[in-house]
Image (spheres, coloured by chain):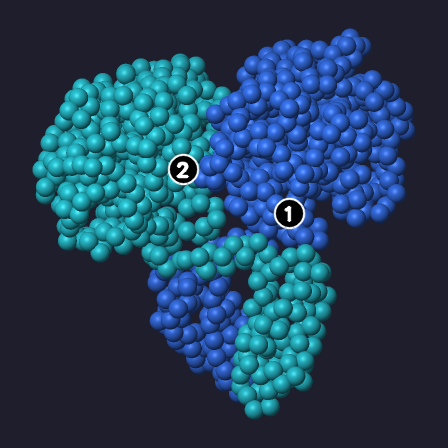
Chain colours: A blue, B cyan
Amino acid sequence: MSKNEPKIQIIPLGGLGEIGKNMTVIQYEKEILVIDAGLMFPEEDMPGIDIVIPDITYLKENRENVKAILLTHGHEDHIGALPYVLQELNVPLFGTKLTLGLVEGKLKENKIKKNVSMNVVNPLQTVKIGNFTVDFFRVNHSIPDSLGIAIHTPVGTICHTGDFKFDQTPVDGKIADLHKLAELGSKGVLVLLSDSTNAERTGYTMSEKVVGATIEEIFGMAKGRIIVATFASNIHRIQQVVDAAFKYDRKVAIVGRSMVNTVSIAESLGYINLPENMILELDEISHLPENKIVIITTGSQGEPMSALTRMAMSEHKKLEILPGDTVLIAATPIPGNEKLVARTIDHLFKQGADVIYEKISGVHVSGHASQEELKLMINLVRPRYFIPVHGEFRHLIHHANLAKEVGIPEENIFIAENGRIIEFSKDGARFSGKVTAGKVLVDGLGVGDVGNIVLRDRKQLAQDGIMIVVVTIDKESTEVVAGPDIISRGFVYVRESEQLIEQAKDIVKQELKKCQEENITEWSSIKSEVREALGKFLFEQTRRRPMILPIIMEV
Amino acid sequence: MSKNEPKIQIIPLGGLGEIGKNMTVIQYEKEILVIDAGLMFPEEDMPGIDIVIPDITYLKENRENVKAILLTHGHEDHIGALPYVLQELNVPLFGTKLTLGLVEGKLKENKIKKNVSMNVVNPLQTVKIGNFTVDFFRVNHSIPDSLGIAIHTPVGTICHTGDFKFDQTPVDGKIADLHKLAELGSKGVLVLLSDSTNAERTGYTMSEKVVGATIEEIFGMAKGRIIVATFASNIHRIQQVVDAAFKYDRKVAIVGRSMVNTVSIAESLGYINLPENMILELDEISHLPENKIVIITTGSQGEPMSALTRMAMSEHKKLEILPGDTVLIAATPIPGNEKLVARTIDHLFKQGADVIYEKISGVHVSGHASQEELKLMINLVRPRYFIPVHGEFRHLIHHANLAKEVGIPEENIFIAENGRIIEFSKDGARFSGKVTAGKVLVDGLGVGDVGNIVLRDRKQLAQDGIMIVVVTIDKESTEVVAGPDIISRGFVYVRESEQLIEQAKDIVKQELKKCQEENITEWSSIKSEVREALGKFLFEQTRRRPMILPIIMEV
């Protein structure tokens, strides 16, 4: 590969080997386009962390060359890092009206005052950005107006599906731009990056309309109030609930902050059709007979602070579950949330509701393509190279196997990882070095200030708690003048273990005496002697390993 | 209901509203039989806890009346609390040879030296215990020789299914004792307690033989080594793996402590048939060609210390995954373990293995009855009363609905909870008071010494860490003579926040000064002033709420 050959580099900064924080860099010569800037929710080994965002060191180092961030759709795992990224970079955004509307809401919520250039694009629109020509095309997904992106460069065309499925009967009647995909395929695509989320699933993903039919059926049978919990961003599902309410002559109240916000944005931008006098405030609707009431709410993931969970726990200020209520959880638990959702369902049953959820009824379909659709996408686009994206490692592997099945040569498939550069030129493609990439943890106002040491400490503290040993020592004589005092938290319930604490104090006294006798005067040495002796004693007595924190005060 | 009428009481001490720690008390007059004594694995809101066992206060209060513990089968959630229960109660055990063999192993592992009366029973055997006549009958489950129990009393017969499914083609050829169930039903059963675990699942649970067929198919295609991870107690599945190995002329090594133990108990008791020279030590098998090797191992739940997980992470001392290995995870993740299992699968793929798991292939079937089998059980036994057991609340509700469907009157169905007494006499049945019941947490050597306060502290420590403030004060003058010193763990990485710590010290100094000026001398008051001021400051600065622990030393 000659040095002067024009080159395209594709650098995933997030979304590979993980579900979430999607972000991909497309670089031609020096110019950079970024696709998406998403967040990820913390794993269970990240206690106390609020969200995780991509490390954008590479973008900061090349800030003057970043021409735009192209947004495929308005889900958190595609736009959720923007409040942080936009504080670091001055860069215009491109996306559909709904996507940018949701971004605006997000920036407002995060109190970002900065003036951001927002450029609305529509499916089948072509935009020139720097030396790139960018085509947008429609795909189906669990939020309206989702886009795939084709970026034309002198080296060839890069096609990114975004999150997608092929819904042959979408709720808004707008099917994916199959003809555009076919046209791209006919003209020749250099490389396809495609959504791997459901690469483990055989067959086709069902149409969102299937959920609508189930919802209608449930509405037909319900005798009391109907409470529907779903994802706030699934506008089409909310539309179908509203349609069912209309058909069965019920009124609707919207409950839960994010649900209210999203529906209001969707309505003002024309993405949802709410018949007149259909939507009532909670106070108004509560005067209607129970069989006239529908409540649409958040909490389909069992989130502890959500409206549904608070209702289930009898902790909601305005709403309580009544016997005879039908509660519809129109969502599937995101991996990791299974137990929270199950707990919410149990509490709803205890309150006397009839609860209908995915495990026992088809009230959810995925927004992501299954294997047959993934193969269809590759067959339509006919790329020379293939990069599976958006997925944990096993999803990428399964997706790569599907690509092989439809004829992509194994050597043309790149299973990449975040930060790995894949370089394309007329001569071929290859991995070519790495850039900084990784997880930046956001905890409260801190972005990146919680690292491995803090997390390790939090995990140890959670496991067996902490024991603090304080002594005050005379500066001159090195005699102990106060203490040792011992305080523990999260270790044992102190009142039940006074004897253990007394013994621990004796151990500390012995160690301090030993140090004095052996002329060990370095505080760090004394502390580590105490820590070791006490740790050994506590483990023998309890088989637990609390964090031990000796503190020496000098007077 | 007259006072002198003979009465039966059924008191669940575990397994209702939860999956695990199954334990049921059957009491006639004063005499008590206990069915099972299981453990539960801790929920995610119980950091540091090893296992959870039932609160047996009621049994301890009536220790002289507890005649026996009847064991349905050898799973942890049915026998796992025995090492603790047997330290409190002198009581004979009844169970099949395999169940008691596993109990013996368990007691040895827990270094329980006590002489326990172990009474082997066989299916269709009748035993007289006190005034009770007890019939045991065979059911199918994911461990051999599982029993259901019928207890005959003057008030009527109580029938408990244990964990069960109906496997029409079980691996050992021993189907459930349908004729005994029919006979019980013909003679009349007062009350049926039945396993609700799979009450959400429609249809029938597949036969274990189906897994055997899939295993054979995979063995037929694998070119390199085959590594199979499954539950150590699923002897029939292990038998099927051994059979497939025999068919394809491979040798087998057993890896992982619990797998080695269980197979050795099962073999010595005749529950597994290992052809001669079939099982080799790991050192021996490693000399064979790769296509002659099968390894059966633990770790199907992604447990961090298990053999499979250590292989996946390249941390196993003797085994590493080689490209070309086929890894079969013949199990489904227990709720809560999904992410651990997924992580293990990803690492195995990264090591170059071909990984086959439930999501993409039928390498697991459940050991519990689905809806059609649950209805069949009720129809066979034809009980007058019905109590769904073994399940979270929603499972009990679904099971109750199935009972209604097959004709049990709603008023004869009792959805109970742990500790709730259900009383039966000739006149009828009713809830009748409560006994102590609940969760006893085991952490290391401590049984029950970790309660809500300790757990609350651990959760707070995990969330935002701890900040410790130490000052030494002169006893006479109440002047500060050393400090304030501030130490934090799990809060922020200190080197990056020296300024924050300095500001925090200033806040503490101000508060101490204020206390002195205002003549606040109670230490508890001073501490709470410091805690409040510092907490407010830290929340403003970081939006985090670490535990704040002020310590005052007096010299």
Looking at the image, residue A71 lies above or below residue B131 = above
The residue that disc 2 covers is: B392
Q: Amino acid at mark 1?
A: Asp
Given residues A181 and A476, the one toward you in this image is A181
Q: Quadrant of the C terminus of chain A?
A: bottom right
Q: Tell which subunit mark 2 falls on.
A: B
The residue that disc 1 covers is: A50
Q: Quadrant of the N terminus of chain A?
A: top right
Q: How many marks?
A: 2
Helix, strand or loop at label 2? It is loop
Q: Position of residue B496 (x, y in %)?
A: 70, 59
Looking at the image, residue B46 lies above or below residue B158 = below
- What's the residue at 57%, 54% (across, down)? B463
- What's the residue at 50%, 59% (across, down)? B457
- Asked whether the viewer can see residue B332, the reply is yes
Given residues A153 and B138, the one toward you in this image is B138
Helix, strand or loop at label 1? It is loop
Cα separation, mark 2 vs mark 1, equals 30 Å
Q: For residue A277, which quarter of the picture? A: top right
Q: Position of residue A278 (x, y in %)?
A: 71, 29
Given residues A527 and B144, the one toward you in this image is B144
A384 lies left or right of A289? right
Q: Amino acid at mark 2?
A: Glu
- What's the residue at 64%, 53% (across, down)? A450
Looking at the image, residue B148 lies above or below residue A209 = below
User: Circle 2: is it few (<14), some (14-19), or many (20+) Cα within 10 Å?
Assistant: many
- What's the residue at 62%, 11% (across, down)? A406
Q: Nearer the viewer, mark 2 or mark 1?
A: 2
Q: Position of residue B461 (x, y in %)?
A: 54, 58
Q: Are marks 2 and 1 on the same chain?
A: no
Looking at the image, residue B467 lies above or below residue A516 = above
Q: Which mark is residue A140?
A: none
